[in-house]
Image (cartoon, rainbow, N blue to C red):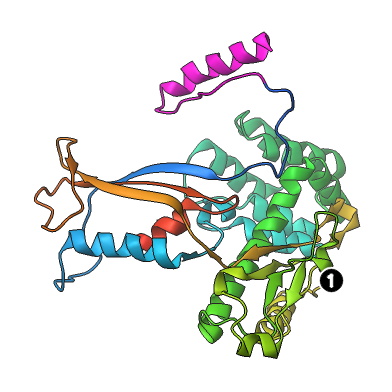
Amino acid sequence: WCFYSCRLKALGRVIGKKGLSVSGIHCASQPLRLGELQGNHFDIIVRNLKFQNNDCSTSLKQRICEAIENVKKNGFINYYGPQRFGLGQNIQTDQIGLALLNEELVKAVKLFFTPEDSDDPVNKAKKYFIETEDAKSTLAMLPDFKVREKMLLRALHRYGINHEGCTRGWLSIPHSMRIFYVHAYCSKIWNEAVSYRVKIYGTRVVAGDLIFSTECTESCLLNDKVHVVTSAEEIANRYAINQVVLPMAGYSVHYPTNKVGEWYQERLARDQLQMSQFRLPALQLNVPGCYRHILKYPHDMSYHFLNGNGEKVGTGDGPLQDSETSLCMSFRLDPSCYATICLREIMKCDL
């Protein structure tokens, strides 16, 4: 324990220089395991406050307060955040995931090494590989911190840039990294699905929607975890919109039995996929799918303003007097919720 404690404290000193901190270090009887996260707490400061357009109907302060109170009351659509899809401008991770699902493994490699419009060493190496397919020389050009790229290139150098070689190349990458790309594609489809669901049905709960079954236990199979809303339940308004879930595409999930389910089928078909086509034995990947609430709420949300001197400004009546005023927000989100999405709903702009 002392060894790991010292390592964490040493790490804390290093990242402290970058404005980050590690705290609350203590000994525990059990290690943390996947799925045990109960949520995340955020303290965020938004600077350079201004209207997105020439809105003169109310004060900036009032508009900000209205936006925050609206999200506190009505929640936000539970989209996957942009970090789920990577920072690439030319190629995003979901495109690689689709190529893997279609078992176009050479194409997936080419997408993986597609360079950005930049002249840094990493993108120079990627551009060289795309132009020459010289895995050995590209390896020498890449910085050591590009671990995934180097793993893949070593396998490609050994086995060749063909279907078999690219299969071995992808298998050389840890499972958690391989599945990341497939999950990115599934997340993109989920985002599109929830947009379609809200567009055609709004916030009504309709027949064919899915909700988590109240009779299900932890041992339930994935297919048994959801209940399909009936016409009688729709008429009786038995369920609220925050109970509705949509499936992440996979081989072991139910899809809605209304127009949203039809949309899933048509959308996957556009990408040459079927609803059951999420097992990839060659890549040792299985994607059973899961369910995700379409609406989420921030918890314990509070906010206030700070003027240019760092002094607290109330949220009451009166305009913001200081052009350097900042907005301070504090809130908690459930696991797998994105603060960027919550902020986007408040600020009405992409982050």
Residue 55 lies, with reference to residue 46, above or below; the image says: below
In the depicted view, which residue is nearer to us: 49 or 158?
A: 49
Residue 155 lies, with reference to residue 302, above or below; the image says: above
Q: Can the viewer see residue 100?
A: yes
First to last magenta residue range: 1-27
Residue denoted by label 1: 276
> Dot 1: what SS?
loop
- Return the x and y of residue 279 as percentages of the image width and height: 86, 61
* Residue 8 forms part of the magenta stretch: yes
Residue at image point 65% right, 57% down: 184
Number of on-image labels = 1
Taking the image as shown, residue 114 lies to the left or right of residue 183, namely: left
Residue 34 lies, with reference to residue 258, above or below; the image says: above
- Return the x and y of residue 98 as percentages of the image width and height: 71, 64
Locate the C terminus and report the quarter of the image it occupies. Answer: bottom left
Residue 260 lies, with reference to residue 173, above or below; the image says: below
Taking the image as shown, residue 279 lies to the left or right of residue 340, namely: right
- Return the x and y of residue 76 as percentages of the image width and height: 47, 65
Locate the N terminus and report the quarter of the image it occupies. Answer: top right
Residue at image point 58% right, 73% down: 194
In the depicted view, which residue is nearer to us: 217 or 138?
A: 217
Q: Can the viewer see residue 251?
A: no
